[in-house]
Amino acid sequence: MESKRAKLAKKKAFLEGVHAVLTKSAYESAAHARRRAAVIAKAGGTCTMEPTDETNVVLCSETTTKAEAMERIKQGKDLGGKPPPEAAHWVTTAWLTECVKAKTFIPYDCFTVRSGAPAPVGESGSSAAETGSPSRQPLRHRSSSASSTSSQRSALQHINSNGDYFPASGSPSRTTSNDNNPARALDVGPMSSTLTVNDTHPRSSEQTALISTAGAATHATAAATEPSASASASASASASASQPSSATQSPAALVARSQRVVGTSPEEIELPPAWEAIYHCYNCGAKDHGARTCPLPPRGTPENTYVPGFPGARKRVSREWMCARSHGHRKDRQGAGPNDLIISNLEKLHDTYADYGTWLHQLKASNLHTALAFIRRMKEPITTYEQARRIPKVGNETAKKIDEILSTGTLQRLEAFDTPEKRAQHEFSQIYGVGTATAKQFVAKGFRTIQDLLDNQHELTERQRIGVRLHQELQERIPRTEVDRMVAHVKHVVLSIEPGCIFEACGSYRRGKKTCGDVDVLISHRDKRVLDTLFKRVIDALHDDGFLTHDLARSEGESTQYKYMGIGKLKDASFHRRVDIIVVPWEEWPCAILYFTGSGAFNRSMRLLARKMGWSLSQHTINYGVVRDRKEKDKKLGDGSVIPVKSEHDVFALLALKYRPPWERNA
DNA sequence: CGGCGGTACTG
DNA sequence: CAGTACC
DNA sequence: GCCG
């Protein structure tokens, strides 16, 4: 259990950072407005009539919705016509006043608040004495607050999952999980945490030592919980302030910041009765909790040798599995890395392998891709063949190539491929809907540039036409702030259609990347009947308001998981962006969010591991007793039976893996 | 030497 | 069915 | 192309 003090700090956390803006409809007179402003000031926030970059709360009157307020703002009646920040929270003034009075804090993601209806959510504030310290600085002037702890994120999520969408399902112990501390995953060097992984394979420990000499410095940081915790907390506390320092924020902090805006999913789901009957904690076997809240150390360590009661379960796993290790991102890092020359050359080699399109070369490419994931995270330069050999997935061939790069600066192999035809083929294959086969066809037809394709659009399929026309725009990475706004928009539309939905933005965004290639949105609802129409209604609504501009592929008719792939654009954005939306049944949520968060290499690794255990992991479920055809591996003879899971943690526990938060799943 | 993720939409 | 896509 |  958390101390009372920690709880108090959490309660203060939201109100501390409030910078509110009043809409005209939120007050009747100047005096009324002053009273509202006083409420905010008492909470330690600041308040204006004009939105600023720091605005994180918009106060609506008791009788308007966000949509109505937006309309008024558009007409210039409120806020002088200046639009509020897209990511701001919309609450009624009465609600905020009440929260301050009761010393409770505000659920952070209430976008559509209707007349007076919502009562303050969260624990009763009576126990929270003396929170309103009058001398608190406004957000913009605070440097960092020691009172905010790194558990703030889970606190917010806790409230969130007990809030509007998931009333009163929480047990008090759910925040005291074996969950990772975000501060431990700071960007400085996720590698160090692999040292805690459960295996002592002789060779791999050697390899780990090699690579993680780089991360040695991180030990100090990770061990010094206090500073890193407050750094993480201040980053998320100052969430809505658009600070230039965001470039230096850790992925964990970036995710925490986004969670305040877009996260609306429970940490655990309820299962259908038949599944609930066989569900138990896959970390210890208890029936009364899941792996997420299991107090025991991770399964597979000497301290915990529990094995779940499903055929194929095993105790230990080699750390060679990518999914068993922490993979922070390295592409985001600024400055030059020690192995940039090697990396850039091997990346080119990877691309040429991928362009072949044959089964064998796909394997070479994916193998090289995995090796690159390990090379990228090294802080020390590779200098010898032997040193390279010790990196996982780097064998004789790759090590020789690294050696060649070290001595000559390039790869002979690459120069042979540097022809106009190959370059054209590679560029074509970057186009959405154009793969290796089509790219080769285009080259064979004599096309060499994108313009050639634009001039011959009749030769293309519908998806390819869209892909070619928008090719330049879609090549652009999306800044995280724009993803924030896109996701907030989609979430608003989804929740106004069906308030009981759960919603999570996944993909690289959930993994804490600073820029994303596309926007991935996962949606579910408890009620199956709702799901059957929800998908179409959401897509239609997003078309109607002009957000979605092109469809690339979408599920038709009824199925279990609905998938939409298309292109969307915010009105004030400069580029069209790829948007994926998936609607899944409630009980498939954990596997779906695991899949949709990725990364791709992480998924492959995890699924391979599951397969080696005789199981099968997919975006739907994890199954045991799967019977596969020996010859044709695509042919499944039996689906087996579902192993029910309530959270991502359960899947990790099943595979005897230490839980990896999203920002450690980059590869 | 055999194995390498699992699934879903388009045409 | 092959091709392409999602992570 | 790497791994068990």
Image (cartoon, coloured by chain):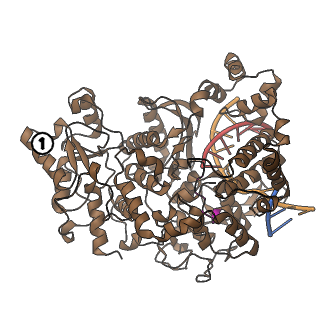
Chain colours: A brown, B orange, C red, D blue
Image: magenta residue range: A323-330
Residue A591: quarter of image: bottom right
Residue A425: quarter of image: top right
Instruction: Please indicate, yes or no, whether residue A270 appears anywhere in the rendered image.
Output: no
> Against A219, is A350 above or below?
above
**Viewer-proximal residue, A4 or A402?**
A402
Residue A154 position, x and y percent, is 40, 63
**Viewer-proximal residue, A466 or A330?**
A330
Chain of residue at mark 1: A
> Against A237, is A285 above or below?
below
* Residue A168 falls inside the magenta stretch: no
Circle 1 crowding by C-alpha within 10 Å: few under 14, some 14–19, many from 20: some
Tell me how many marks there are.
1
Which residue is farthest top? Answer: A455
Quadrant that contains the C terminus of chain A:
bottom right
Q: Which residue is drawn at 78% across and 38% down?
A: A355
Q: Which residue is drawn at 28% across and 72% down?
A: A5
Residue A359 position, x and y percent, is 82, 47
Report the magenta stretch's main SS. Answer: loop
Q: Given the image, on which type of amino acid does mark 1 rest?
A: Ala
Residue A389 horizontal side relative to residue A93, left or right: right
> Against A561, is A130 above or below?
below
Residue A283 position, x and y percent, is 56, 76
Q: Name the residue under label 1.
A: A33
Residue A461: quarter of image: top right
Say which element carries label 1.
helix
**Viewer-proximal residue, A232 or A636?**
A232
Residue A442 horizontal side relative to residue A58, left or right: right
